[in-house]
Every structure is written in C-alpha cells, then in structure tokens.
Image (cartoon, helix red, strand yellow):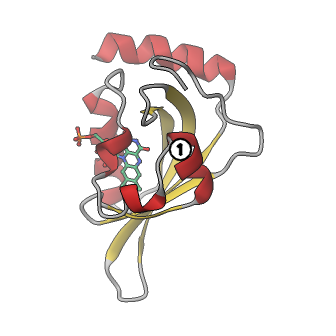
Amino acid sequence: MAVGKETVLSDNAFLVSETDAKGNILFANKEFCDIAEYELDDLLGKPHNIVRHEDMPKAAFKDLWDTVKSGEVWQGYVKNKTKSGGYYWVFATVYPYLNEAKEQCYMSCRRKPSREEVTKHEALYKTMI
Ligand SMILES: Cc1cc2nc3c(=O)[nH]c(=O)nc-3n(C[C@H](O)[C@H](O)[C@H](O)COP(=O)(O)O)c2cc1C
C-alpha cells in the first residue's frame, strides 16, 4: 500500500478496538490490525491517535470525547491513516463502558461507510481544518 492510497473496506468488515479512559489501546481485532497495517503488539498501550489522519479536524475528536465522557454513544465518519501512509474511511460507533475491574473503557466498532457519506465528509472536514 503506497502513500496516499485508499484501502476500501469490504462490505462485511468489522474493525474493533478498545481503549482505556485516556484513549490508550488495550485491544484491536485482527481486521483492525490488517487494515491499519500494524501488528497487535505495535498498537497495545499506544495512544489511539497512532492512526490519526491529518485530514481529520480536531473538532470531530472533541465531539467524540465529549460524547463518550458524558456516557453517550458517539457515531461518526473517520478517515484513518495506515502505517505505510495510505488511508481508509470508516463509520465508527464508540461506546463507553466499565470493564470487569470497573475501570472506564471505550470501544469503537467500525463498518464500511457509504461512498456518498465519504464524499460528503471528505469535503466537510476540509472546511473544518
Ligand atoms: C474507543 C476509541 C477509538 C478511537 N478511534 C480512533 C481512530 O480510529 N482514529 C483516530 O484518529 N482517533 C480515534 N480515537 C480518538 C483518539 O483518541 C484521539 O482523540 C484522536 O486521534 C485525535 O488525536 P489528538 O487527541 O492527539 O489530537 C478514538 C478514541 C476512542 C476512545
């Protein structure tokens, strides 16, 4: 995968990651690792902004964090960066919950977004940078 190239998710793709209260990665499923081009060991303990793409506006993540910290579920379109400098779009649903030890955690489940929404958000986010 070359710099600037898009990876389009398959229709049934389901990319999952789990973080602690600060957004450090506790788990990522194989599909997440494969699409982002990381080994799980490269991701564990790292801040989730490891896959942040520079085209994503700060306001989107502020909204995400404000929402989940208030106990609500956040949904939105996210452009992420692959290890080799490519990118992939997801429709993410981020959930707050307590783990078995009653510690605050968050989980994001990502599906393939529609092309219409990708086009719309690519343009929208450009106006927010
Ligand atoms: C469960 C969870 C999943 C997240 N997934 C992503 C993600 O896939 N891509 C991303 O850029 N940020 C993700 N974030 C947001 C990051 O924690 C971070 O706020 C964002 O990358 C912006 O980086 P910055 O805070 O350094 O500006 C996630 C946060 C949580 C709680």
Quadrant containing ligand 1 reads: top left
Q: Is residue 25 above or below residue 6?
A: below
- Circle 1 crowding by C-alpha within 10 Å: few under 14, some 14–19, many from 20: many
Give the residue drawn at x 53%, y 18%: 5
The spot of residue 126 in percent (x, y) is: 37, 12
Q: Which residue is mark 1?
A: 92
Give the residue drawn at x 66%, y 51%: 14
The image quarter containing residue 69 is: bottom left
Specify the farthest residue to the right: 11
Classify mark 1 as within 8 Å of ligand 1 or not, answering yes or no: yes
Q: Which residue is at the front of the view, 54 or 85?
A: 85
The image quarter containing residue 97 is: bottom left
For label 1, the SS is: strand
Quarter holding the N terminus is top right
The spot of residue 108 in percent (x, y) is: 49, 55
The spot of residue 86 in percent (x, y) is: 48, 25
